[in-house]
Image: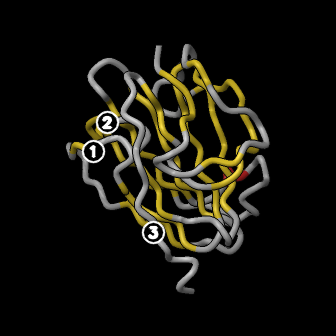
Amino acid sequence: MTWFFRDPERHIPNEPNVIVSPADGKITEIVTEKEPFNGELCKRVTIFLSVFNVHVNRVPIAGTIEEIRYNPGKFLAAFNPKASMDNEQNIILINNGKTHIFVKQIAGLIARRIVCWPKKGDYYKSGQRYGLIRFGSRVDILLPETTKLSIACGDRVSGGKSIIGYLT
């Protein structure tokens, strides 16, 4: 239990337009789809967190939390592609003044507790801790379609430390 709830300090990259990983884990999927609020096309990057990963989630870009939506749902295995739509999840919308991105905390088969600390209107710095998912889970990050990605399926990332890509 102590190993699971570890929360290491991270050096957050501060390059212009950088997007940092919201979670530790393995990139399992990169697809184009419609985002959940207004249906615009976006890039979805899926990060699978095993029970051995750090489960603290971090904000990928600095900005204001414009929306928070909690959706109750199923508890399919987090690596199942249907988990993104069917599982219990919490979605935050972050606006940096120029663009917006979404981060989904998705509960898995074992993970059944999503914790999200921000409130609508809060300002968060890039890489700042905003919540956690207990015991194996998944995090999806939905980015503008024009985002220049710097990761690929199979890559391992560290929350707040690894660069996912750059806003254009």
- Determine whether the residue tagged by mark 2 lies in a helix, strand or loop: loop
Is tag 1's residue or tag 3's residue first in the polypeptide sequence? 3
Measure how far apart labels 3 and 2 are at the Cα level.
Answer: 20 Å
The three-letter amino acid code for the residue at tag 3 is Asp
Is tag 3's residue or tag 2's residue first in the polypeptide sequence? 3
- Determine whether the residue tagged by mark 1 lies in a helix, strand or loop: strand
| Residue 124 tag number | 1
Residue that mark 3 sits on: 7
**Which residue is more in the foreground, 34 or 30?**
30
**Measured from the top left, where is residue 150 in percent x and y?**
63, 27
Is tag 2's residue or tag 1's residue first in the polypeptide sequence? 2
Asked if residue 126 lies left or right of residue 113, the reply is: left
Quarter of the image with the N terminus in it: bottom right
Residue appearing at x 46%, y 48% in the figure? 160
**Which residue is more in the foreground, 125 or 16?**
16
| Residue 62 tag number | 2
